[in-house]
Image: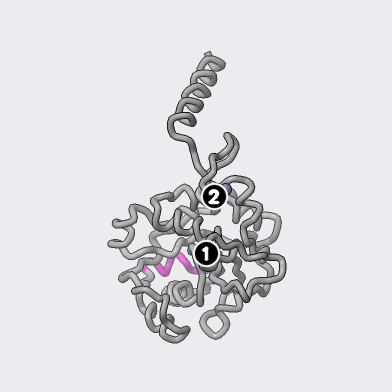
């Protein structure tokens, strides 16, 4: 019976593959059976940061003078025209929350070989404003957190901090303007839950760190709470990329 069921499942999968072939969200080529969302060729070429949570890295440096964090990491760089940008766009704008789940798992597996998660008590995805979440249908950072939780077993807390308003576009703002733009947009609803806890705040992208810093600042009043950060991507300019990365442009 079991063998028959698995045989039928395979047939159903094959038919679906023929009728609706799965494509790589980066290069748009057909995926192999064992591949999910991104083909292995594109995965190997992503501009990984290789920070792996090391004590000081370009992601943690963004928070100097803004806020005190325990440690932080970002998984890959993104820049205009990069393949990694397509992954972020699929996650944020193309209704593919499963991209968050997959890359959340990959980030966690990469960091699991280090002490990064050692004393973390819970994961807190940076919340969206209610209207934005309703429009998108999901919070992409929460799906990244779900992926991280699958690997680490850590709980996800979505009831500790809320975003009262969505920040308007930050693209054309300088560092100080970005900081002002996001100040006071988060509100901590349950500071008592954070008492003596070390939480990992998860977001999709870090650019200047102002949004994450604002989110953490809202929670900082909690007694003896500690904060670390993890993002899928760190914004970079191609000229500032480290030597191990050869920028990939598709335009
Ligand atoms: Zn591909």
Q: Residue at x 36, y 66 (%)?
A: 162
The secondary structure type at the circle numbered 1 is loop
Q: How is the image coloured?
A: one colour
- Look at mark 1 in the image and give the residue it sits on: 81
Q: Is residue 176 left or right of residue 149?
A: left
Question: Is 61 situated above or below 230?
Answer: below
Question: Is 22 situated above or below 47?
Answer: above
Residue 187 locus on image (x, y percent): 36, 72
The secondary structure type at the circle numbered 2 is loop
Residue 33 locus on image (x, y percent): 57, 34
Q: Is residue 86 magenta?
A: no
First of labels 2, 1 by sequence position: 2
Q: 10 Å neighbourhood of mark 1: few (<14), some, or many (≥20)?
A: some
Image-quadrant location for residue 133: bottom left
Is residue 22 visible in the rendered image? The answer is yes
Q: Residue at x 58, y 61 (%)?
A: 120
Image-quadrant location for residue 246: bottom right
Using the image, tell me which numbered label, if any, was put on residue 27.
Answer: 2
Compare residues 169 and 106 and report the one nearer the observer: 169
Q: Is mark 2 within 8 Å of ligand 1?
A: yes
Q: Residue at x 64, y 72 (%)?
A: 241
What are the residue bounds of the magenta stretch?
Answer: 189-201
Residue 95 locus on image (x, y percent): 39, 51
């Amino acid at each position: 019976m079991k063998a028959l069921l698995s045989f039928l499942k395979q047939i159903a999968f094959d038919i679906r593959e023929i009728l609706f072939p799965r494509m790589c969200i980066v290069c748009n080529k057909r995926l192999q059976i064992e591949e999910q969302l991104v083909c292995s060729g594109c995965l190997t070429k992503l501009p990984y940061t290789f920070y792996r949570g090391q004590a000081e890295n370009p992601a943690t440096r963004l928070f100097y003078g803004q806020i005190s964090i325990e440690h932080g990491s970002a998984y890959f760089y993104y820049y205009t025209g990069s393949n990694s940008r397509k992954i972020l766009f699929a996650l944020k704008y193309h209704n593919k929350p499963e991209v968050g789940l997959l890359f959340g798992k990959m980030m966690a597996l990469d960091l699991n070989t280090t002490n990064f998660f050692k004393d973390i008590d819970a994961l807190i995805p940076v919340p969206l404003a209610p209207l934005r979440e309703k429009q998108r249908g999901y919070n992409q950072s929460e799906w990244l957190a779900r992926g991280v939780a699958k690997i680490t077993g850590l709980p996800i807390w979505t009831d500790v901090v809320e975003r009262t308003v969505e920040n308007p576009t930050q693209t054309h703002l300088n560092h100080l303007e970005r900081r002002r733009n996001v100040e006071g947009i988060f509100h901590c609803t349950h500071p008592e839950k954070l008492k003596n806890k070390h939480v990992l705040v998860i977001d999709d992208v870090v650019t200047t760190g102002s949004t994450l810093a604002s989110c953490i600042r809202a929670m900082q009043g909690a007694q003896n709470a500690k904060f670390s950060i993890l993002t899928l991507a760190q914004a970079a300019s191609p000229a500032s990329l480290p030597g191990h990365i050869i920028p990939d442009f598709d335009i």
